[in-house]
Amino acid sequence: MVLISVPASYANTLSSRGVFFLQQGVVAGLGATLLSPTSLLAQETQPKKTSKPEKAGALGEPYFTPTEFFQDVSRGKPIPHSLSEERRREVGLTSDTWSLEVVSDTASPAKLLKPMSKASGTALNFEALLKLGEQHSVRFPKVMTCLNMGCPLGMGLWEGVPLRTILWLTEPKENVRRVFYYGYHNDDPKQIFRSSLPIGRVLEDPIGLPPVILCYKLNGEWLSPERGGPVRLVVPEHYGFKSVKWLSHVVLTNAPFANDTYAEQNNDVDSPLKTFAASLSVPREVKAGEPIPVSGYAQVGVAGLAKVQVSIEPSSTERMDDPYHAQAPWLDAEILPPPTQWHSLKDGLIPEGTFGFAQGKPVEWPLKLANAHWAANLSPLAAGEYLFRCRTIDQQGNAQPLPRPFRKSGHAAVESITVIVKDS
């Protein structure tokens, strides 16, 4: 197998993936007939409001997922965002009624001089949070992904106040080892969805990572109830279960262990985002002698992204001693460049001061904790049945699914797709 590669300059009016194939004169994998630039853009980049896109968080354009197209895996009976506005106001899920308690754990107390509680009238309200945001607000891109799903739920530009800014207001003095937190749960203890973090992660950011935030904006707009508004937690490097929606309580504790709801369900609650590749467009049938256009996305985890690679080989190929397909005929695909217009944002521009950007452009590409897109044009094959695969190589040189191949620590399995090549 070889890759047919042509240098590309990407046009503003098309997704870079579409231009990649148009410039090579190949669109078979993108539709049954030759597509005009306008129809290609409509087919490849525009989610339809009539049905929830299966891979809304992985589409090339718009890069930042419109809030209405995020996938939703919210919990609760009823799901809190489905409550009437009147009921949401009653239970503190509107900006004028929301408040946050920051208190000590009664079972394993931390020493706080100024806990924030509703009973004492010191709980943090939305107006006070925004006031803190005037000096401390942070904005960063992040892909929201479920630990046990192989597709992003959505890509967003999240904005809020660092959690540590609020914690310091309680004047913690000693015996603080972890932060427990949870959101509104229909006043039913059995529905509480909890998560937790080491205090060190909250107070100090690892090199290259933004802080954990109390988030109130997504893509420049107020956070909707569906996305966890008025306020949710967002943990940049973790899967979605750490970014609890409808935040209501933060508990400082001296306990040395996690209390995450996900831990009770046999999940690894300390595994950060993995780097992996998946397809968006792979033709299931092609004619012998014709090139095979393929494209997809990569989730860029904490280990970064150095390469995306693709392979295609006869499906009869067997390597019983090669569970991760290391010996497949891998070749480098092309990682597509960043957008020239950031649709879903005001004026299509990245706001000044956004983490990871300078003068509206990414400081590095691909962005960590976000998505990148890739494309390749495979050389023609003889008739037969083949298996197409894609994988990532991270910045440490690890090939997907390594270094963390275990399912309960996050999806990273290598995708395999059957492609039938027929005689023309």
Image (tube, rainbow, N blue to C red):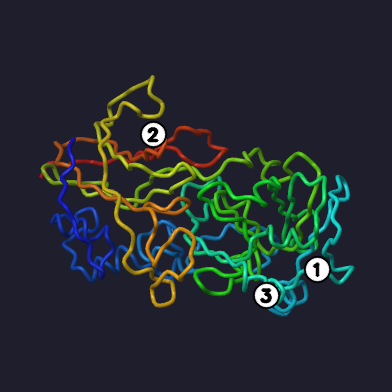
- Where in the figure is residue 158, as x and y percent of width and height? 54, 64
**Mark identifier at residue 397:** 2
Residue identifier under label 3: 131
One can see residue 149 in this view: yes
Quarter of the rendering occupied by the C terminus: top left
Name the residue at 42% across, 53% down.
367
Q: Nearer the viewer, residue 419 or 232?
A: 232
Q: Amino acid at mark 3?
A: Lys
For label 3, the crowd category at 10 Å Cα-Cα, with few meaning under 14, some 14 to 19 and many 20 or more, is few
Q: Residue furthest top?
A: 321
Asked whether 49 or 262 is in front, the reply is 262
Determine the residue positioned at 47% across, 60% down: 155
Q: Is residue 77 above or below residue 4?
A: below
Q: Position of residue 257 (x, y in %)?
A: 75, 39
Residue shown at the point (34%, 69%) measured from the top left: 341
Kindly identify which residue carries mark 1.
Answer: 123
